[in-house]
Amino acid sequence: MTCTRITLSSWYKQNGVAHAKPNYKLSYRYSPGEMLHLQQQFCKKLMHYWRRRAVEIVFIDECSCNAWDKPGKMWVKKDEPFHTRLAPTRGKSVQIQGAISNRQPEFMWTAKKKNNARSFKALLVKLTPWLKDPARTVYILDNASWHRNPGIKAYLRGKGISVMYLPSSSSVLNPIEQCWGTFKRQLSRTLATYTHEQLKSINFKRAVHDELTTFAREQDGTRYANNGKRYVKLVLDGQVQ
C-alpha cells in the first residue's frame, strides 16, 4: 500500500477546486537608510552604557514553544543518523519570558500561559531583587504592547530603572534571542528521546519547566549578553541588521 502525502493544495487539485497562492511582499515602516539611522542611534547609546562598568544592562524578551518545535541546526556524531519524534498533538504552547545581564551569569525566567502586562510584571518583580543596583540598571526591551504598558512604566520609574526600546525589526540587537535558539534546540533533543507513547502522554508544560531549570543552571548569561557587542559594532560600521 502506498501512502500519499495529502496537502491542501493536492486536495484542491484532486477535487477540481480553483485556487491561487496570494502574492505578497513584506514591507517595513522605514526605508533601509532610515532603519540604519535608527539602529545606529540606538547602538551609540547602548555602547555608552556598555563602556560604563558600573551600569548593568539587562536584555529581556519572550518566546513560545510547543511540542511540534523542530530542531534547526545542531551538532551530531558523524555517520550516526539523528531521528526526531514529533508529538502526535501540538498541545498548548508555553510562553516564556527571560532576562540576561552583562554583569551576572544567571539566566532568569518565568513561564506563563500568556504574554501580557500581568505576566511581564511578574518577571519584573522577580528581577528587581536580583539586580546589583536598580538605579544603575538599563532594561533593553522590544516594542511589545505590554512593555509600554503605563503600569509597567510606572513600576520601573519607581525602582529607578532606565529603559531602552529596540528599533522596530531589530531583534538581532537583543542577544537573548541566541539564548532562545539554544534552548529550543536543547528541548528538541530531549523530546527526541521520548517514545511515541511517552509523547502521547507528555505534560508539555512540565517538560518545558524541567528543561528550563536545567538550561538556566548550565548557561552563562553574561556570555550571551556580551556577544551582542558584535552585532552592535556591525551596525555602527554601517551594516543594516
Image (spheres, grey):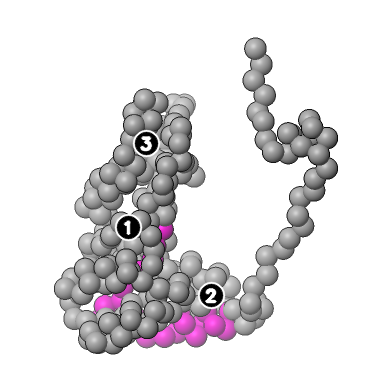
Q: Specify start and end residues of the magenta stretch as a single range.
A: 36-63
Question: Which residue corresponds to the image point at 65% horizontal and 12% vertical from the top-left?
Answer: 1
Mark whose residue sits in front, 3 or 1: 1
Instruction: Give the labeled residue for mark 1.
Output: 112
- Which residue ends up furthest to the top in the rendered image? 1
Q: Is residue 214 left or right of residue 186?
A: left
Choose the circle earlier in sequence order: 3 or 2.
Answer: 2
Q: What residue is shown with label 2?
A: 168
Assess whether mark 1 and mark 3 are in contact (beta carbons under 8 angstroms): no
| Dot placed on the residue nearer the N-terminal end, 3 or 1 | 1
**Amino acid tagged 2:** Ser
Residue type, label 3 = Leu
Frontmost residue, 44 versus 59: 59
**Which quadrant does the C terminus fall into?**
bottom right
Q: Nearer the viewer, residue 216 or 155?
A: 155
Give the amino acid at mark 1: Lys
Are the two marked residues, 1 and 2, in contact with CB atoms closer than 8 angstroms?
A: no
Does residue 83 appear to the left or right of 154 in the view shown? right
Can the viewer see residue 170? yes
Does residue 232 lie above or below 157 as drawn? above
- Is 132 positioned to the left or the right of 185 in the image? left
Location of mark 3 (residue) = 191
> Against 137, is 80 above or below?
above
Q: Relative to 157, does residue 30 appear above or below in the rendering?
A: above
Q: Which mark is residue 203?
A: none
Give the total number of marks visible in the rendering: 3
Where is residue 207 drawn, in percent x and y?
Answer: 30, 42
Could you tell which of marks 1 and 2 lies nearer the N-terminus?
A: 1
Q: Quadrant of residue 103?
A: bottom left
